[in-house]
Every structure is written in C-alpha cells, then in structure tokens.
Amino acid sequence: MPTEGTAPIPTNTLSTVAPTDAAQPPELPEEATAPPPAAAGPVSAKNLPAPAKLGTGWKTYVDPGGAEEGFIGNQAWTRRREAHQAAFEALPVGCGNPLPTSSLPVPKHALQGAYRTGAGKPATVLVLRFADAGLASEYYRGYQTRMTACGDKGNLQVKQLWSSTDAVASVRAYVEAEAFVEVSTLKGSTVALLAQASTTPDAQAAWARSVVPAMQAVIDSP
C-alpha cells in the first residue's frame, strides 16, 4: 500500500509470450549494449555466400557499428540479429500503395553478413532460418506480396526486375537516396535477402540471376 502523500508508480508490463507475427514491430528494439555474437544458433558464416561467388572484387566487411547504426561492432563480418526485428525490418515501409495486413511467421534465427562490392558499395545478406520449410515459404510469399504491392508512388519505390519460382530480383529505392538491388530466395527452411547499393540498378538483372545459385548452395545447410 502506498503511504500517505505518495502515489503508486505505474509499471509497463511486457508480454511474456513469444512473438508470432513478423509483420508487426517488436515490443522492444534490438539491444545495443554489447557486441552481438558472430553466429545465430546453427546459422553461421558458412550459410552466407563467399564474396567471390557474388562478383569480381567483392569482399567481406567488418562493420564497426555505432550509435547511428544501432549496434556495437563485434570485429566480425557477420552478426546475429534479433530474429523478429530482422524479419520485420526486411519488409517494405513507406510505400504509396496499401500493403497486405496478413500476419507473417517469425524466424527462429537471423544472421546478417556485410560485404563491399567490387565498386566499393555496401551490400548485405540476411539469412532468416525458420522452424520448418512451411513457415519459411509463408514468410517468403508474404514478403514478395508486399514488395509487389508497394508500387512506385510513395517515399519507397519498388520495381521488380524478374521473378522465378524460388527467387526474385527487385530494385528498392527511397526518394532522394541510393537505390538497392535486392535478390530474395527460398531454400528449405531458410529465406535469404541480398541487398546491394547500386547507381545502375536497372542494368543488374543478369548479375542478380547469377548470384542465386551461390545463395541457395549454402543458406539452408545445417
């Protein structure tokens, strides 16, 4: 009981239930109080394509992180991501068209690798490992549906370069910002998203096709 002249202090109670919808933002952002591990459960650098497989002159990049980036560098080119946060942030935001509101499954593990292209541009590969292939396929379909629905009239503009049964290449560009060529693919219980900054994104459809086998060869390895 509060004493006379004092008032009870309200508390904010966070849910103890594991998140189930990657289409909704997490209650708390990823912690940035310590360097993240270089692996995420069974997912490690072995599940990311070697830079030489992605293009001439590509290299891995040790991102130092910082306050603006929202994480502390771990002196490695890979870092574990909070799985819910990573899956949510991969979705398009700022589109001119309304997006689907259906829920999406949350992966069990998420690992991000940093690269530099032969032209010195930043690139990343995000690997999302789900509990089973059905959940991975559900997230992949929901991701693609949102990317297709985004359109080219909002702050974020998305244009598809090509699509196949298990891979899609798109250009994602924010107004007055550098464009990114994105290659998304599905293999087993894993979804992988490659994003490369580019000044000539429309000319990279063939490159995008060329990297899919390298991604699919490793992303779902145990």
Image: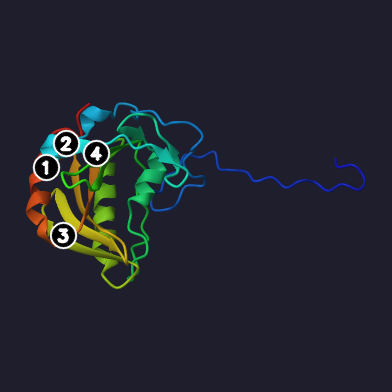
The image quadrant that residue 110 belongs to is top left
Residue 163, how many percent across, how many down? 12, 56
What separation in Å lies between label 2 and label 3 (alpha carbons)? 20 Å
Between residues 190 and 56, which one lies in front from this camera angle? 56
**Please, which residue is most extreme toward the bottom here?**
153
The residue at which mark 2 appears reads as 51
**Please, which residue is most extreme toward the front here?**
120
Mark sitting earlier along the chain (1/3):
1
Q: Mark 2 touching mark 4, by CB under 8 A?
A: no
The residue at which mark 3 appears reads as 200
5 vs 52: above or below: below
Q: Mark 1 touching mark 2, by CB under 8 A?
A: yes
Is label 1 in a helix, a strand or a loop? loop
Q: Mark 2 touching mark 3, by CB under 8 A?
A: no
The image quadrant that residue 171 belongs to is bottom left
Mark 3 crowdedness (10 Å alpha carbons): few <14, some 14-19, many ≥20: few
Mark 2 crowdedness (10 Å alpha carbons): few <14, some 14-19, many ≥20: some
What separation in Å lies between label 4 and label 3 (alpha carbons)? 29 Å
Is label 2 in a helix, a strand or a loop? helix
Residue 97, how many percent across, how many down? 32, 71
What separation in Å lies between label 4 and label 1 (alpha carbons)? 23 Å
The residue at which mark 1 appears reads as 55
Residue 210, how many percent across, how many down? 7, 46
The residue at which mark 4 appears reads as 190
What separation in Å lies between label 1 and label 3 (alpha carbons)? 15 Å
Identify residue type, mark 4.
Thr
